[in-house]
Amino acid sequence: MTTSNPDVNTLAEFDTILDQRHMRGQWQYDAQLELIRKDGPLPAGMPYLWSWESMRSSLFELSELMGETNTARRNISFINPDPRANGTSHTLVMGMQLVFPGEIAWAHRHSINALRFVVDGSPDLFTVVDGEKCAMETFDLVLTPAYTWHDHHNESAEPRIWIDILDVPVFGMLRQMFFETFGESVQPVRAAPADELSRRSSVIRPAWESPRAERIPYRYPWREMSAAFDIWANAEGSPYDGVILHYAHPITGGPTMPTIDCFVQSLRPGQHTLRHRHTSSAVYYVMEGEGTTVVGEQELHWSSGDSFVVPNWMWHRHINRSGAARALLFSATDAPLLKALGMYREEPEESFGAQSYPDVPADIAVRQRGCR
Ligand SMILES: [Fe+2]
Ligand SMILES: [Fe+2]
């Protein structure tokens, strides 16, 4: 083939020339488009499991090298072995943090949203969020939404560990990272309950104020979630996730945070869920039990304390390997972000948000008919 450029005789040579001009031809994406045409979005990252022992020992090894948390968080993140993920998944970073008795992780705030799910807590472990003291008992969830000041305190007698989940990869990609230190190691705690923002997030609110949905410090105590599991103990639940409960935003009833949704699911002894996939990715922490999550061709065998990731758009199902005990999984997903962009999809059906309420009790139905 001859062209007007004597140095270019093939398309491959032209691709190189374009590269030098900082240009790229659409045809270079043809192979990728063909894959997407056949099966939808390409998953970012790979399914992977980190054992509790590997994280626990890493945190204590780190503590020998890094003393006080007064200048830094003693935190280690789970990094997906596939560099395309750039985090635990491509949108979420999950890690664990170790705080020794008497330590304080100083007050700061940032544009990213973060949450803490407590692995080993105490009433004397707490995070102050915008002046509100949020106790961190085992399996409590504490939100530190974007731009809320937060400092962590361990006033108990034992080392404590919690999970941090953040939307760092998304904000980093969008170049929206802001970070500020408070100036003092701790922020003042609001003395008057009436000054607390979280008081405005219950169903009883001051009527002279407009409800605010952003930047609300919030704690979901495990004792309330645990009681909810007792209520739904005999429910069929979702065929894909068992009995799965949502941490709804206290004001909007929607996602836990603008970019992250949180759940706990209970799998019955011996339960095998049906296979599904969704455009969101999810990170999991095993609270209780032992089982297997099959993601694509890979089997992730988990037990209490382990953490794992299910990348976007990969078929997966959960198995409780115990015939006698339930399994409990905490999870966080990036679905709210995708829903905001109109990009959230599930296969084989949309099950999240599906409406399935109990029927009106029979005696009420009869009475209603009698009134007509
Ligand atoms: Fe932070
Ligand atoms: Fe799922």
Image (cartoon, rainbow, N blue to C red):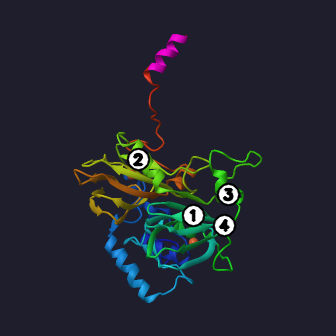
- Local crowd size for mark 3, using a 10 Å CA cut-off: few (<14), some (14–19), many (≥20): some
Q: Left or right: where does residue 238 sit relative to residue 251? A: left
* Type of amino acid under label 1: Cys
- The residues bearing labels 3 and 4 have C-alpha atoms spaced at a distance of 9 Å
Magenta stretch bounds: 363-371
- The residues bearing labels 1 and 2 have C-alpha atoms spaced at a distance of 23 Å
The secondary structure type at the circle numbered 4 is loop
From the viewer's side, name the closer residue of 128 and 211.
128
* Type of amino acid under label 4: Gly
- Local crowd size for mark 2, using a 10 Å CA cut-off: few (<14), some (14–19), many (≥20): some
- The residues bearing labels 4 and 2 have C-alpha atoms spaced at a distance of 31 Å
The residue that label 1 is drawn on is 134
Q: Could you say which disc has been placed on residue 229 in the image?
A: 2
Q: Could you say which disc has been placed on residue 131 in the image?
A: 4
Q: Quadrant of residue 81?
A: bottom left
Lower sequence index among marks 2 and 3: 3
The residue that label 3 is drawn on is 197
| Residue sitting at x 51%, y 11% | 370
